[in-house]
Image (cartoon, rainbow, N blue to C red):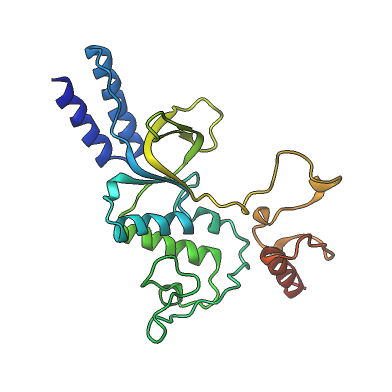
Amino acid sequence: DATQAATFVDEILELLTADSAACATASQLRAAYLEASGEEWSPKPLDVLIVGAGASGVGMGILLTKVFRLRPQRVLLVERGGGVGESFLRWPREMRFISPSFNQQGWTKSFDLNSVVYGTSPAFTLHAEHPTGEQYARYLRALAERAKLAVRTGTEVEAVRRRPDGSFEVEVGPAGDDGGGERTVLRSRYVVWAAGEFQYPRASGPLFPGCELCLHNSEVRSWKELPGDDFVVIGGYESGMDAASNLAASG
């Protein structure tokens, strides 16, 4: 019967949400069923789709599943990188958190300043007061694995559309794809954008004459390995001060 078949495919998609290949297979089964039956049917939407599996995305995912008790299969994180905390892995090797991590749970009952989940502490997990990007990515991965969050990596969000019923359609495809890869449309009651804003240079057009001669912080793998002795740092926020400090320390 059409309704039973649709419900069965819904359950398959829900269980395999984080597996791109399995989802594609289930979607093909759904398409074949629709062609054969002529029935109008769409898969059951997710409760929440979170764009980004960094600090905000992982923290939100755990809040929704552990505090508000949403089923982990009903909350999906999509990440354009190869894993949880990908943007932190792109930090220069010398770059560290300016805000210190302290395991304060014992006497203040407050967060470690760099924690994203209550009851956890990067200081305790990493044994580091000022974690590197690689260390912090390891902390986020441990949280995501322990909470059994559903995460689809290597996935680029290409469009978000609101449906008449108030839910959303999110069109996704393979990250870094030239447009030839298979596109998937995910449905969700809510969408949370947790993709960050400062890790990518603005590439929509020239910001000022000569900007193409500059190097964005996200393109630096190590300050020590940059050729030359004289540098000008544009910007005095955290990454700018970190760059100036590490360049000076490198001689």
- Outermost bottom residue: 107
The percent coordinates of residue 114 (x first, y second) are: 50, 70
- Outermost left residue: 1
| Quarter location, residue 248 | bottom right
The percent coordinates of residue 163 (x first, y second) are: 42, 30
Q: Is residue 58 visible?
A: yes
Camera-nearest residue between 149 and 82: 149
> What residue is drawn where x is 68% and y is 48%?
201
Camera-nearest residue between 52 and 48: 48
Up-down relation of residue 229 to residue 199 (above or below): below
In the rendered structure, the answer to whether residue 91 lies left or right of residue 230 reads left
| Quarter location, residue 142 | bottom left
- Outermost right residue: 209
> What residue is drawn where x is 66% and y is 62%?
222
The percent coordinates of residue 49 (x first, y second) are: 40, 44
In the rendered structure, the answer to whether residue 233 lies left or right of residue 40 reads right
Q: Quadrant of the N terminus?
A: top left
Q: Is residue 18 visible?
A: no
> What residue is drawn where x is 31% and y is 27%?
27
Q: Quadrant of the C terminus?
A: bottom right
The percent coordinates of residue 48 (x first, y second) are: 37, 45
Camera-nearest residue between 59 and 203: 59
> What residue is drawn where x is 85% and y is 46%?
210
Up-down relation of residue 251 to residue 90 (above or below): below
In the rendered structure, the answer to whether residue 45 lies left or right of residue 135 reads left
Up-down relation of residue 48 to residue 114 (above or below): above
In the rendered structure, the answer to whether residue 198 lies left or right of residue 118 reads right
Numbered disc total:
0
